[in-house]
Amino acid sequence: MTDPARTPSSPRRLVLVTGGSRGLGRNAARALAARGFDVVVTFQRAAAEAAEAVAEIERAGARGAALQLDTGDAASFPGFVDRLHALLGRDGRADRLHGLVNNAGVGVHASFAETTPAQFDHLVAVHVKGPFFLAQALLPLLADGGRILNVSSGLARFTVPGYAAYATMKGAVEVMTRYQAKELGARGIAVNTLAPGAIETDFGGGAVRDTPALNAALAAQTALGRVGLPDDIGPLVASMMDDAHGWISGQRIEASGGMFL
């Protein structure tokens, strides 16, 4: 499928989606491909699922690739950047990175009183240190006028007991976004936060998707009367990479269907 905003002579645009082998990341990768972007997805262990995601990207008419990355291991980022750099320009691919979607994440459900230092440190590594230093490492490959989209959560605005540590990380992501937007603006790079609400995916063990009582309770607190689906998020991610939204930067965009208004 061809992006109507692109002409046949337009240069190809490549977007990197971390955690793109499943869930919202995989849905976003498909939506990006349908919009005319080439996509590289990262995966930590699920190589087979990542290969399936690449096949979906290519069926949509774009070029896809998968690279292994542990976003909680900042020491591995220089090697990852080298592997991504080697991919750029190959087989007619884009020679620069147009966009980065910092999507990879893990969940911890524990009360404030019961959260352990080990759980907290792991969340910091994956959700805060990882996106901070991955974006930093990718700056030489990121094109002027490019895009960074950091994935936060509705939990950074409203409170649901059991997510104190996770939501704390997402609050940090939202502050980081504003600083990135300010400091990278001179290069024309727009940086924003996307904060999904409750979504039916396998995240957190698939609790929202697979627990009818929880699903119904969250739907009752949502203005549009249901919890979200991956298809509510992926196309929004793709649209934020496009030039039509290039004047939006430093903003928090919540896609929750109006939760806890």
Image (cartoon, rainbow, N blue to C red):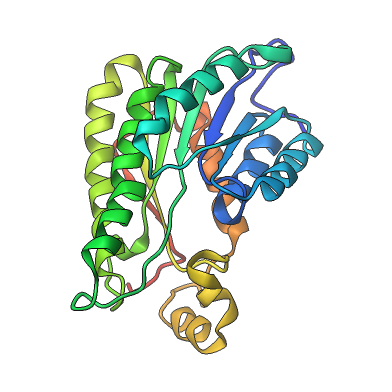
Q: Nearer the viewer, residue 233 or 97?
A: 97
Name of the residue lying farthest toward the left: 113
Name the quadrant of the C terminus: bottom left
Name the quadrant of the N terminus: top right
Q: Is residue 81 left or right of residue 185?
A: right
Quadrant of the rendered image containing residue 128: top left
Q: Is residue 226 visible?
A: no
Please give the name of the residue rendered at 32% of the width and 55% of the height, measured from the top-left corner.
Answer: 122
Place of residue 57 in the rendered image (x, y in percent of width and height, measured from the top left): 72, 38
Name of the residue lying farthest toward the right: 59
Place of residue 188 in the rendered image (x, y in percent of width and height, measured from the top left): 36, 18
Please give the name of the residue rendered at 59% of the width and 59% of the height, measured from the top-left corner.
Answer: 230
Q: Nearer the viewer, residue 163 or 8?
A: 163
Place of residue 197 in the rendered image (x, y in percent of width and height, measured from the top left): 43, 64
Compared with 57, 226 (above or below) is below
Quadrant of the rendered image containing residue 3: top right
Q: Is residue 65 left or right of residue 211?
A: right
Name of the residue lying farthest toward the bottom: 213
Q: Is residue 235 visible?
A: yes
Place of residue 164 in the rendered image (x, y in percent of width and height, measured from the top left): 25, 69
Q: Nearer the viewer, residue 175 or 220?
A: 175
Q: Is residue 62 left or right of residue 197?
A: right
Compared with 55, 209 (above or below) is below
